[in-house]
Amino acid sequence: MKIDFEKNNGLVPVIVQDATTAKVLMMAYMNEEALSLTKKNKKLTFYSRSRKEIWVKGETSGNYLHLVDIKVDCDGDTLLARAIPDGPACHTGSDTCWHEVNKKDSLEFVSYLENIIEERKDADPDSSYTARLFDKGVKKISQKVGEEAVELILEAMDDRDDLMLEESADLVYHLLVLLHAKGYAFRDVAATLRKRHKI
């Protein structure tokens, strides 16, 4: 959808959300130049209405907001930017501009990882390992899940906990790729577990 910069004198509001935790971090404005620079440099760049100039979030503090993706709303006049913050998003030092704690939960990372996996489903196989796995198909992905499961078992039996965790991560990653190759996501596995638990 085309972005309507004319509705608000050349500016559109941008809601910034942490791509990992889904917490809303801040709100600012972009003009066409700020949006173009954001897409080019992958760092959120805004237009200051008070200073009447372009500014890169984190340029002074080092607390950059690294762009994951940016979407336009149904009316074409508001943007949602998902980003990975380097530190607090608010100039006061708070995690968010509403003085909320933006707690990084490792489980929330799974959702973030699944978004990346889904985006790479139809990507150029030369662009990433994940894209190459999808290109090889379900049989190859299933084989990798089996290999990682065997490696996990071996490390667990040898009491090598650090390597067991590494192999667990490999297994979960390949399982997520397999689920997405089959049109499912981890939430479908969680739903199956929940059904068994009769909640």
Image: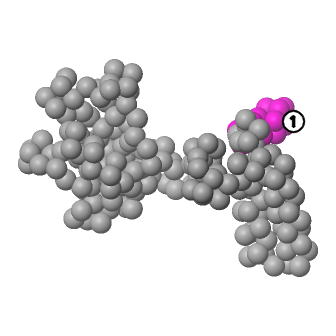
Quarter of the image with the C terminus is top right
Spot the residue most to the left.
51
Residue 152 lies within the magenta run: no
Could you say which is closer to the camera, residue 42 or residue 137?
137
* Left or right, 85 with reference to 59: right
SS type, badge 1: helix
Tell me which secondary structure the magenta stretch mostly adopts.
helix
Q: As drawn, which residue projects farthest toward the top?
A: 75
Report the residue marked by disc 1: 196
Residue in front for this viewpoint, 90 or 12: 12
In the image, taking residue 143 as reference, residue 17 lies left or right, namely left
The x and y percentages for residue 118 are 62, 43
Write the start and end of the magenta stretch as one range. 186-199
Decide which of 39, 91 is in the foreground and name it: 39
Q: Is residue 169 left or right of residue 117?
A: right
Quarter the N terminus occupies: top left
Query: Residue drawn at (51%, 50%), measured in percent from left and top?
Result: 20
Quarter occupied by residue 150: bottom right
Disc 1 marks a residue whose amino acid type is: Arg
Q: Residue at position x 84%, y 37% from top?
A: 197
Q: Position of residue 82 (x, y in %)?
A: 42, 44
Identify the residue at horizontal 84%, vertical 49% (top origin): 139
In the rendered view, tell whether residue 21 sits above or below residue 160.
above
Relative to 103, residue 185 above or below: above
**Neighbourhood count class around disc 1 (C-alpha, 10 Å): few under 14, some 14–19, many 20 upward:** few
Percent coordinates x, y for residue 21 in the rendering: 51, 48
